[in-house]
Image: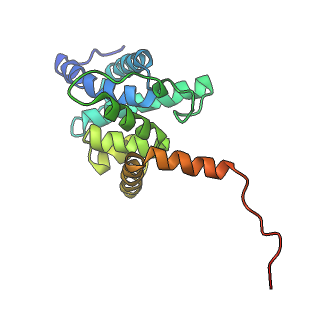
Amino acid sequence: MLRRPSAEFEAQVVAQLGAMRRYARALTGDAAWADDLVQDAAERALSKAASFRPDSNLRAWLLTILRHIYIDQLRGRREIAVDDESAPWRTLEAPHGEVDGLVLRDLQRALYALPAAQREVLLLVCVEELSYQEAAAVLGVPAGTVMSRLSRAREQLRALLDADPARDSARDSARRTAPLRVVGTMR
């Protein structure tokens, strides 16, 4: 017989829905898919409430469940995680607000230009404010790996945001032109 989780546990899960939605939206780049992930993760968490250790971090536990469901869905769709050029976040509109839309769009594009492993660590530690140990538990990797990925992600994100688009396009067009060859040497 399934035991219903306590009202207190349900309230704690509901309080984490915002963090779960942010993480799901960052993983998928799609609001509808993110909402479905959050709902599936919340349902699974409530059905597995008995397996939650009260002395552990509920948010980390919920994000772990969400990430596992996301990976299962990617496998089911036979998709490669979020590094596709035609991914939906490439064309998303920046929300209106206090942050300049162009800056936000540049940050979003730079974030999705990061490898998935670095992006996940950056989101968990910097956005969701999990500790290195909590992020390591969510991702199933050692804490040292989290710190290393985070360092590389910050460095690469900084480089992507500091890049000069005019210089980069000139460099790219130079790469596309045929390289010069040495035909002979003069003595």
Judge whether residue 69 can be spotted in this image. no
Residue placed furthest toward the bottom: 187
> Image quadrant of residue 52?
top left
Residue under the image location 35 percent in, 44 percent down: 122
Residue under the image location 59 percent in, 33 percent down: 80
Label count reads: 0
In the image, is residue 45 above or below residue 140? Answer: above
Residue placed furthest toward the left: 8
Q: Name the spot of residue 5 as percent of width and height, x first.
A: 25, 18
Q: Quadrant of the N terminus?
A: top left
Describe residue 58's horizontal placement relative to residue 31 as left or right. Answer: left
Q: Observer-nearest residue: 150 or 3?
A: 150
In the image, is residue 162 above or below residue 54? Answer: below
Describe residue 3's horizontal placement relative to residue 98 as left or right. Answer: right
Q: Name the spot of residue 44 as percent of width and height, x first.
A: 38, 21
> Image quadrant of residue 185?
bottom right
Q: Observer-nearest residue: 138 or 85?
A: 85
Instruction: Describe the colour scheme in one phrase.
Output: rainbow
Q: Observer-nearest residue: 51 or 58?
A: 58
Q: Observer-nearest residue: 164 or 155?
A: 164
Q: Name the spot of residue 116 as percent of width and height, x first.
A: 48, 41
In the image, is residue 114 above or below residue 62? Answer: below
Residue placed furthest toward the right: 184
